[in-house]
Amino acid sequence: MQSEAGAERGRGAAPAGQGALEKPEPAAPSKGGPSRRPPPRPLPSRTPTGTWRNHNAHFKSPVLLPKACPSDVANTEPLQQETEELEHKDRALEQEIGQLSAEGFSLEELDRHITLLHEYNEIKDAGQRLLGQLAVIRGVTTKELYPEFGLDLND
């Protein structure tokens, strides 16, 4: 039996104490110096391969520059008319603001009113979500719940 074990060792079997699944020790470098790693690969290029050239040379801007031509003179008339209309609306709004100020309305009152409207809408939205959840639990539509809680469908 010993001769068979010796023969096994001679054929390249693992020496005693080293399991078959363990990795063998790496071989020593051939020239006696430290092992050399291959040089790192260069990073991939983000530009197309081929001849080196200025890649921005053929860039065409999507912004069109205005050109002076006789048709532009005809296009200024509608712009002038639109400008006059806007100035007229501005004067009308200034008059309306002056009239409301004369009647006793103030900007602070308007801001307070807007704040209260936002608060009202948030509370109403929360109530609508609760009605929706209750309708799902009961298996009915929210429309059917309105009379039960004394709500009007138009609210």
Image (cartoon, rainbow, N blue to C red):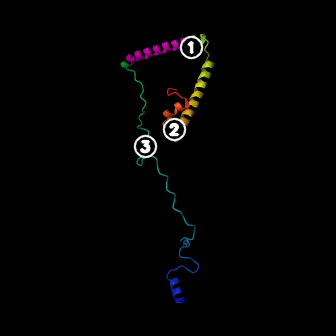
Q: Which residue is mark 1?
A: 97
- Magenta includes 13? no
CB within 8 Å, label 2 to label 3: no
Q: Secondary structure at mark 3?
A: loop
Q: Is residue 64 left or right of residue 119?
A: left
Q: Amino acid at mark 1?
A: Ile
Q: Earlier in the sequence, mark 1 or mark 2?
A: 1
The span shown in magenta is: 72-96
Image position, residue 31 (x, y; %): 54, 70
Q: Which residue is mark 2?
A: 135
Q: Amino acid at mark 3?
A: Arg
Q: Which residue is mark 3?
A: 53
Image position, residue 36 (x, y; %): 54, 64
CB within 8 Å, label 1 to label 3: no
Q: Secondary structure at mark 2?
A: helix
Q: Earlier in the sequence, mark 2 or mark 3?
A: 3
